[in-house]
Amino acid sequence: MDAKTVNGHFLKIGTCVTFNPAFTHMFRIQDMHDDFKEISEIGYKGLELSLRDVDDINWQTFDAEIEKNGLELITLATGLVRKMDYISLMDENVENRNKAILRIKRMIEQISSYASSNKNILIGYVKGELSDSTEDNKKRISFFNESLWNLLNFAQRKKVRLVLEVINHKDTNFINTIESGLKLISNFKSDYLKLAIDTFHMNIDENNSYRAIKVAGTEIGYVHLADEDRKYPGSGNIDFESILKVLTENNYSGYLTMEFSADNNMKDRFQSLDKGYNYIKNILQSFNKNN
């Protein structure tokens, strides 16, 4: 279901999925036929898929199942590239750096073929880590910028957007706040490079999430939703109403994508997906009633 916002936009709600058990903070697909059917029936429209390599997926089956259930692939996430192979876009080893670039280019190529309303590549943990050495960090940031230019030029040709994720300081030491993300992407000046924000990460490192989002304005290209402790929205104390309100004030019209720890081992694996979806949907619908 789409929910009309205060500024007349329609925001769709998506969810993060993976086939890989290495990531526990998202819903793990066990059976494409049953799982995509249930996700669609809850009301979700878009899927963010986290994968290590495009060769890991049976795309023919995947495409048939999402089409049958009225879902669209909106984002490919790259975190498993670093999680599984420990390579990054600022790796000091040029061979490893090039491996990361090539892996992401293959993802860009893959998603470019879809007729989705959004086509994003999420650049998060694969950015890499800084060291304790100032001199080393100068090199690493230079490597990262070179890698990002390389990917951005390719993505622009394929009409795919790169979204650079802001991640809290407990998980990484590079781009921890919206302000630092804005500073970095300002060097590129491209509509194909935007920020991805995540309410879980913002709750840790932003002094005022509302203000930070307001300042970022149209540089925000993608949004992840999760409550405290990476649970479903509405299970904790994050003020989602204020966050969604400022996004609509900024004329954000992209997806709101759930990324929270799903109950992958519970009998009712969809319970948290359902609760999170309905909590956010009700906030968006309340905007309609009040305007």
Image (spheres, helix red, strand yellow):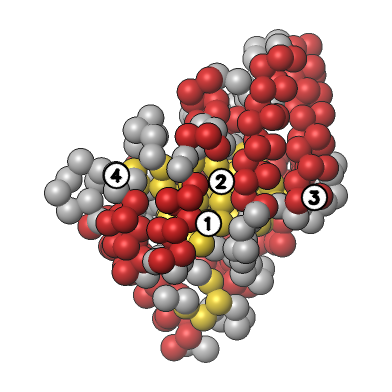
- In the image: residue 47, left or right of residue 189: left
Residue behind mark 4: 30
User: How far separated are the C-alphas under marks 1 and 2?
Assistant: 8 Å
Would you say 236 lies left or right of 157 here? left
> Which residue is at 22% across, 51% downward?
269
Q: Which residue is mark 2?
A: 76
Query: From where the camera sits, is residue 228 visible?
Result: no
Q: Residues within 10 Å of mark 4 (few under 14, many from 20)?
A: few
Quarter the N terminus occupies = bottom left
Q: Residue at x 67, y 17 (%)?
A: 96
Badge 3: residue crowd in 10 Å (few <14, some 14–19, many ≥20): some
Q: Is residue 114 visible?
A: yes
* Numbered mark located on residue 73 in the image: 1
Foreground disc of the pair 4, 2:
4
| First in residue order: circle 4 vs circle 3 | 4
Q: CA distance from mark 3 to mark 1?
A: 18 Å
What's the distance in space between the residues labelled 3 and 2, CA to CA? 16 Å
Determine the residue positioned at 34% across, 51% down.
32
Give the left or right position of residue 153, taking residue 220 as reference.
right
Q: Considering only order in the chain, which callout, 2 or 4, is on the residue closer to the N terminus?
A: 4
Looking at the image, is mark 1 or mark 4 earlier in the sequence? 4
Q: Amino acid at mark 3?
A: Gln
Image coords of residue 147 (percent x, y): 77, 30
Near mark 2 (Cα within 10 A), the count class, few <14, some 14-19 or many ≥20, is many
Q: Secondary structure at mark 1?
A: strand
Q: Residue furthest left?
A: 267
